[in-house]
């Protein structure tokens, strides 16, 4: 047999041997799909919309991490769910603000047992949220002018609705102001239909640059053609809230969100995406890394995330 044929036979034998050896080795298992449940907030806030974008990007780019975004009535609902449902610890992250944590720790409202076994751990900081009034009503110049009037705010399950209750109480208006709890997407319509005299709103922003953006109620107020303006919160009201154990602080903005001359003083509250301390660390790392690595693409499509 000539050398060429011998070489060919040896090559075939070597390939077969390699295949046999390879088949005997344990296969590298592909990690099964891991789905994180994200408790967000009502549509119109910008939160579920932005997180749905991240979920879409994960499905396109990540081999095993997925995101299930759940619209909720707000951050208070999310905190309640994390406290009452320990089964969520292993796969759920929730939008929660420190204001809500302070309410729970002091045993107020719907949290008589405090945080129970929930050990809140910050996965991603959102930023500082600002809370204040907007109104086209010339009679409402300060929070105190809401005496005998109607205030529209967010749902009771959210920080916006709950902080409105606290601010009204701190201003001594509990028995003198009617509060209407309406989802974000309907607030300005309700105002323009004559159902309220002012709206208690929130806006996300960068606490360092003071660059603020507006959720749907700000956008609609600007587009309404009515003379909406921002009304700040008196410093003594914020101090009274803080002294009672609530995690709030005064924040002065260089301009208001409606692009009118500032400054105004608003209630500042820090918010974020929180998990329980037992949440899988490798999953938390993968998600955080993905957000950082894709921050530019996220920012281009979801304006809210430009302020991280």
Image: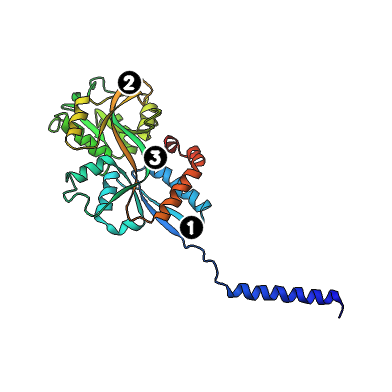
Label located before the other in sequence (1 or 3): 3
- Residue 64, above or below 222: below
Within 10 angstroms of label 1, few (less than 14), some, or many (20 or more) residues? some
User: Is the residue marked by circle 2 packed among few (<14), some (14-19), or many (20+) residues within 10 Å?
Assistant: few
Q: Quadrant of the C terminus?
A: top left
Residue at the bottom extreme, as displayed: 1
Taking the spot 32% from the left edge, 48% from the top edge, the residue there is: 121
In terms of image quadrants, where is residue 279?
Answer: bottom left
Quarter assignment of residue 86:
bottom left
Q: Is residue 34 left or right of residue 163?
A: right
User: Is residue 133 visible in the rendered structure shown here?
Assistant: no
Instruction: Report the residue that reaches farthest toward the right.
Output: 2
| Nearer to us: label 1 or label 3 | 1
Work out how far the residue at label 1 is from the one at label 3, CA to CA, in angstroms.
26 Å
Q: Looking at the image, is mark 2 or mark 3 earlier in the sequence?
A: 3
Left or right: 253 as drawn, with respect to 62: left
Residue topped by disc 2: 263
Q: Gap in Å between the C-alphas at discs 1 and 2?
A: 47 Å
Label 2 element class: strand
> At 38% across and 23% down in the image, what residue appears?
259
Q: Which residue is mark 1?
A: 64
Residue at which label 3 appears: 46
Q: Does residue 259 appear in the picture of this structure?
A: yes
The N terminus appears in which quarter of the rendering? bottom right
Residue extending furthest toward the left? 175
Name above or below for residue 129 compared with residue 293. above
């Amino acid at each position: 047999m000539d050398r060429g044929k011998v070489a060919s036979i040896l090559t075939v034998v070597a390939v077969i041997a390699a295949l046999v050896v390879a088949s005997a080795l344990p296969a590298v298992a592909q990690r099964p799909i891991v789905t994180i449940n994200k408790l967000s907030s009502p549509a119109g806030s910008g939160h579920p919309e932005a997180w749905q974008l991240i979920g879409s990007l994960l499905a396109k780019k990540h081999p095993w991490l997925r995101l299930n975004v759940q619209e909720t009535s707000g951050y208070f609902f999310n905190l309640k769910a994390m406290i009452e449902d320990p089964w969520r610890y292993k796969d759920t992250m929730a939008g929660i603000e420190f204001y809500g944590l302070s309410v729970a720790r002091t045993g107020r409202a719907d949290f008589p047992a405090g945080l129970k076994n929930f050990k809140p751990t910050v996965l991603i900081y959102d930023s500082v949220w600002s809370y204040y009034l907007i109104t086209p009503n010339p009679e409402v110049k300060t929070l105190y002018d809401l005496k005998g009037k109607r205030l529209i705010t967010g749902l009771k399950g959210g920080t916006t609705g709950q902080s409105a209750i606290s601010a009204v109480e701190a201003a001594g208006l509990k028995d003198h102001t009617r509060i209407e709890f309406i989802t974000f997407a309907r607030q300005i319509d309700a105002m323009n239909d004559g159902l309220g005299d002012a709206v208690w709103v929130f806006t996300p922003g960068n606490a360092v640059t003071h660059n603020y953006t507006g959720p749907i109620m700000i956008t609609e107020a600007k587009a309404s053609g009515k003379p909406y303006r921002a009304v700040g919160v008196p410093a003594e009201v914020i101090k009274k809230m803080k002294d009672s154990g609530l995690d709030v602080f005064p924040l002065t903005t260089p301009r208001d969100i409606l692009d009118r001359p500032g400054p105004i003083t608003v209630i500042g509250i820090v918010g974020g995406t929180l998990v329980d301390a037992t949440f899988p660390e490798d999953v938390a790392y993968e998600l955080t890394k993905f957000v950082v690595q894709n921050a530019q693409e996220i920012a281009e499509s979801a304006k809210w995330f430009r302020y991280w």
